[in-house]
Amino acid sequence: MPKRSPAVQLDRAIDALFVASRPGPEPNPSPAVVQLIPIARALRGLPRPDFKAALKSDLQRRTTMNEATAPSPAPTRPTPFRRPNFPNIAPYFLVNGAPQFVDFLVSAFEGTERIRVPRPDGSIMHGEVAIGNSVIELGDANEQYPSRPMTTHLYVPDADATYARALKAGATPVYAPTDEHPSGDRWGEAKDPFGNTWYIATRKSSVASPEGFLTVQPYLHLRNAHEMIPFIEAALGAKATGVHKSPDGIVRHATIEIAGATFEIDEAQGESQATQSYLHVYVPDTDAVYAQALAAGATGVTPPSNAPYGDRAAAVNDRFGNTWFLATYLGSQQP
């Protein structure tokens, strides 16, 4: 048998030590290997149990100290669920003659047209006009979504100047801005040529929406308005932020918040008859809110789906006949 190299001889000796046996006789072992075998035998029992226990304790202590002194991870930023520059609950006007309605909004309220999706015949499928810090949506009415006269509350820096511009643009006066309004704001009212009512006001009260003073707020006149509050809380996760009732329980005015944006309601009476509105509201989770609304008694119009404009969208009708277009902004998340 050929003579093994010193390295192989040493490997054999160490292998034998690890299986707790003495190395077999090696014919003519290398003198270097003979000297190394006692050292390998001495190292076989290391590390000692007390050393391993001390090392474990020290490592655990260092790990604990590092965890305690490590900086906390930065809080994750909530995913935005609104489309950029869309802070309010938008009244969605469906009118006959949407191009002319855009012209009115621009002239009367210093609006800025920012989106127009035309049909081949020149009518508008969808449009958006920015007024102040808010958005109004619009389109030409159709069989599925007929025209509805709606009421909108505008908060502007100068109610008198805005009121005058609205009349010049074709609105009909109801009453000029006055400081005698029960809200404490300077408040006037006008009707546009399309049958919609506009409350034009300058804030004097200190009550603000969660995101500050939004320029545009839908205003709903309802029969049994007090029933809207528990319904909308259950259906859309809303919260009433200010409710004023008469001694007999009639809602004179209420501000209601949905996901940080607000709308207003009161009891329909006198010239302020009950109307039905179209409203577009952004929510954190369209699917969850849609299911929640149906469970609360709303009627499904369109189930949730991914819209081509980057929203997860759905629609429901509430028990008062208003249509709510629900949306969650998908943005770059959309496949």
Image (cartoon, rainbow, N blue to C red):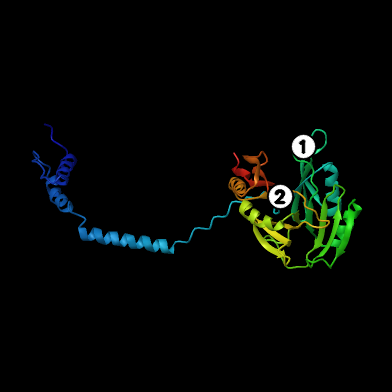
Left or right of 300 on screen, residue 138:
right
Say which element carries label 2.
loop
Q: Amino acid at mark 1?
A: Glu
Mark nearer the viewer, 2 or 1: 2
Query: Mark 1 highlights which residue?
Result: 143
Instruction: Look at the picture and state if 41 lies above or below 156.
Output: above
- Residue 121 seen in the current view: yes
**If you read the primary sequence from the N terminus, does the residue marked by circle 2 or circle 1 appear first?**
1
Total marks shown come to: 2
Q: What is the secondary structure assignment of the residue under circle 1?
A: loop
The image quarter containing residue 300 is top right
Q: Amino acid at mark 2?
A: Phe
Q: Quadrant of the N terminus?
A: top left
- Near mark 2 (Cα within 10 A), the count class, few <14, some 14-19 or many ≥20, is some
Location of residue 174 (image quadrant): bottom right
At 25% from the left edge and 60% from the top edge, which residue is drawn? 53
The percent position of residue 312, horizontal first and vertical second, equals: 63, 43
Q: Position of residue 266 (x, y in %)?
A: 74, 58
Q: In 3D space, how far apart are the residues under numbered discs 2 and 1 (Cα atoms)?
A: 20 Å
Camera-side residue: 180 or 62?
A: 180
- Residue wearing tag 2: 320
The x, y position of residue 8, in whole percent, is 18, 39
Can the viewer see residue 314 in this picture?
A: no
Q: Nearer the viewer, residue 246 or 208?
A: 246
Q: Is residue 72 above or below residue 147?
A: below
Relative horizontal placement of residue 69, taking residue 307 as reference (left or right): left
Residue at horizontal 61%, vertical 46%?
294
